[in-house]
Image (cartoon, rainbow, N blue to C red):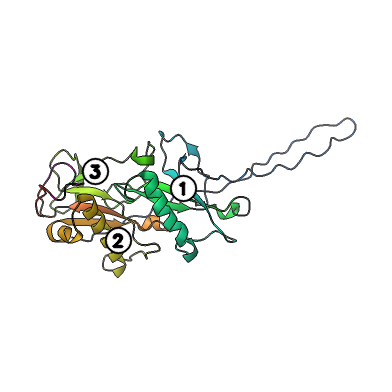
Amino acid sequence: MSIRGYGTALAFAALLLTAACSAGSSSAPAAAPPPSPSPSAPAPVVPQVGQSYDRPFGGEIMTPEAVDCAKDHQVEIAHVGQLTGGRPLGPGSADLAPADAECRAKTAAYLGTPLGRRGLTYELAQPAAADWDRGPHWFACEVVAVDFTPGDPKLATVQTAFAAGRGTPAPRCFTLSAAHDLNPADCAQPHSAEYVGAPSAAYNSPMPKNGDDPAMTPFQVACRDEIAAEMGVTAKKLDDTWGYNFWVAKNLAPAGASVAQCYFVLWSGKTITGSIFATKGKNIPKG
């Protein structure tokens, strides 16, 4: 098993509603008309389960727009709950831990597959600070797909709904270069690596500063355990027989996602055809 680098920064767009104001006047030959009521800001958006949005909630730039799940989007709402308290809670807040645990369970149930499989995971969103006093204090569990490109753990744009396993991403496989770079390959052709998913470390796991930081360990363990579970082997069998690699998604941490891109790798350069999922290690050479 080799620890390589981790991902590049990604800035996401999310939630800030702006007031639309208008003014008008008309000439009055006699008495002036009664004053019109002052226009008010539109009500804050409250996401609903099953909706898809073009971008995640929770930032301070643009309001996410609901879109058809068959069209480009980055977020699908798996669950909406309620928060208590007088202000939004920052990612990693101890008071947000119960909502995070709820999101893990509810998102997995919504997907009908293990959390993290082939990149499908969650982010926890809240109303923007500007909307906190104007609407419900909700939190939303957003289904997101972490892109399969090695070392670039950004959110993918998708064109399908993921509820009940209807849109599980296709397997993504790679050949291994002499420099141990992963290059995209057809899974039906000989290859040495596969994108397994985006496993989650424990809530509020610190982001590692470099590859030697002990903070890498929870992400390494999460990656190993997810590969073992998807293959149907023990973690020890995986460690003793095959290899893997991962990149911590530091860029997703501000949205509360403690995940890593995780890959099964035959570092020997030996090859297989097809996916490793549910193989129990059968016909996969040591490597």
Neighbourhood count class around disc 1 (C-alpha, 10 Å): few under 14, some 14–19, many 20 upward: many
Q: Amino acid at mark 1?
A: His
Q: Which residue is label 1 attached to? A: 79
Q: Is residue 11 visible?
A: no
On screen, residue 53 versus residue 173, left or right, reads: right
Residue in the foreground of this view, choosing between 152 and 203: 203
**Looking at the image, residue 80 lies above or below residue 238:** above
Q: Which residues are magenta?
A: 272-281
**Looking at the image, residue 48 lies above or below residue 10:** above
Q: Amino acid at mark 3?
A: Arg
Q: Quadrant of the N terminus?
A: bottom left
Circle 1 — which element? strand
Magenta span contains residue 267: no
Residue drawn at 47 percent across, 36 percent down = 67
Position of residue 88 measured from the top left corner of the image (x, y, whole percent) = 54, 58
Of labels 1 and 2, the one closer to you: 1
